[in-house]
Amino acid sequence: MSPILTTLLPLFPPEQLLLPTHPAYAHLTNDYASSLESDFHPACIFRPRNKFDVARFIRAVKPFTDRNEIMFAVRGHGRQSTPGCANISNGVMVDLREVVGIKVRRAAGGGGGGGVVRIGAGERWGDVYNVLAAKGLAVTGSLSEDCGISILSSREGFVCDNVLNFQVVLASGEIVNANANENPDLWMALRGGGNNFGIVTRYDMRTFRQGPIFGGSVSYHHCDLDEQLDLLVKALRNGHATIDTHIRMTMTYQKKWGGYLCTNQVYYTQAVPGPLVLRQFTTMKCEVTSRRTMSMMTMWEAARMRNSDVEEGQTRCAYMNTTVKSDFETLRTAWRVFRGALRGEEEDTEGLLYSLTFLPYPRSMLEKSQKLGGNSLGLHPTSGPLVSVVLATHWRNVEDDEMVLGLMKEVLGRIEDEAARRGTGERFKLMNYSFDFQDPVASYGLQSQLRLLEVSRKYDPSGMFQRAVPGGFKLRGSWGRW
Ligand SMILES: Cc1cc2nc3c(=O)[nH]c(=O)nc-3n(C[C@H](O)[C@H](O)[C@H](O)COP(=O)(O)OP(=O)(O)OC[C@H]3O[C@@H](n4cnc5c(N)ncnc54)[C@H](O)[C@@H]3O)c2cc1C
């Protein structure tokens, strides 16, 4: 038995430290959104139940990580598809799904709600939404653990902007809070800086009053797309039209559809059925009416509606993204590049679901980020409105990995080249949707990157989370050795 296991086994019961022979091991390593992640085979899985377990683990592995004798991965719910970001071969996978608890504090004061909800790192957004909805409250969340986009983001900023306090276990094993008063540099770094500073065991998030919302999706043939893109760009220019709306446009190829289908996922964050501002994105000539899902819904129902076109067996999945200015010609060119790249044999790839999404960052969202104290992303309201261009592909067989990933990279590269040529490219990459060849931290800009490195050196002087946690997006990027 390896020295690290000899050290860890006496510290935790067998149901918290699972070896490959344990009956639950296979399920836990297969339960990722993408099987690109479950291709990894950890030497053991550690399942902490609280912050003290995490701290004990970190203290126990520290001497080994200092000598480069062991590596580990930190896993939330395994929804990010980047290979190895939350799993590892031959190391320890730290699975946080049992670090749970949802506690609403200082709830329901005054007009805005003005409360805080404490969320264990292993909780799921749906459960958080349900607990809060019972009190007429909500939080800006998505499926995302980190700095993500919510359907409330036009009004409430990025998900990470809404974290008032991170409870973190540092590389020393110390448990600290990071908020506006305590360790504010760490607080800012964690707003977008990924798994580079410690293991977050609890997120304390800002709550506000929120009732049901109106939303859903409408699908249509691409004969309507140019008009829809034009409307999207115009809506983004008019800040008032977007503060309560969330609009994302996805173009998807599936062989069984006989080609491409466009889908607008649209939400209005007030209890108004069919608001005028959304009508132009839900009324089109070439609609596929059988796919319409517009209705009043709770936040929980909205979160559950996601990704319904993915079928069993389409387990291999990859996301890549770039950012462009909200410009009609740039978006139209991206769609043409995307559509033109899939040809012949590739169209027959088993289980292929090939999609391009335009996910807007309205100026109101970037302004709200600033009002809520800012983050590490290096985005400024004056650079908006922006559009995140996200490629997401699902397929069935490992033999097709190289072809599919090659195709996606080529499409992304060509979209970036076209945007650069037009002067509408932006360097920013959203970490949640980045693939392993991308460097989201560098995309935040030099100033932010240097600040993150400084914070890392202060809170993790031995570089544990740079060297011993190789998955995810590291700070050093192109900076060479730690
Ligand atoms: C179907 C689908 C829909 C999605 N929709 C959205 C969306 O609407 N908005 C959006 O923003 N994103 C979305 N995403 C992306 C996804 O939500 C994010 O990538 C998110 O980070 C995943 O969270 P997770 O807990 O599953 O993280 P994991 O996949 O488990 O881990 C992701 C990274 O975060 C690190 N990490 C996780 N937990 C911790 C912790 N407690 N402490 C330190 N590091 C940690 C891991 O080490 C890893 O590097 C979607 C993904 C899928 C598959």
Image (cartoon, rainbow, N blue to C red):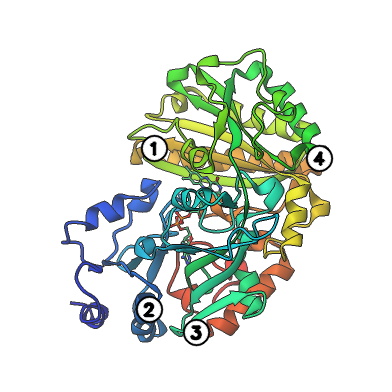
Label 2: which residue? 52
Real-space Cα separation, disc 2 to disc 1, in angstroms: 43 Å
Relative placement, left or right, of 77 versus 451 is left
Label 3: which residue? 462
Q: Are marks 4 and 3 in contact (CB under 8 Å)?
A: no
Q: Are marks 3 and 2 in contact (CB under 8 Å)?
A: no
Residue 28 image position (x, y, % from top left): 28, 55
Relative placement, left or right, of 173 versus 295 is left
Real-space Cα separation, disc 3 to disc 2, in angstroms: 21 Å
Label 1: which residue? 400
Q: Nearer the viewer, residue 346 or 116?
A: 116
Q: Quadrant of residue 77?
A: bottom left
Report the amino acid beneath label 1. Asp
Residue 94 image position (x, y, % from top left): 36, 67
Relative placement, left or right, of 67 versus 435 is left
**Image depth: mark 3 or mark 2 in front:** 2
Report the amino acid beneath label 4. His
Res 125 visible: yes
* Location of residue 82 with respect to 22 vertically, above or below: above
Q: Between disc 4 and disc 2, whose residue precedes?
A: 2
Res 434 visible: no
* Location of residue 250 with respect to 200 vertically, above or below: above
Q: Between disc 4 and disc 3, whose residue precedes?
A: 4
At 72% from the left edge and 66% from the top edge, which residue is drawn? Answer: 373
Label 4: which residue? 240
Q: Secondary structure at mark 2?
A: helix
State which quarter of the image contains the N terminus.
Answer: bottom left
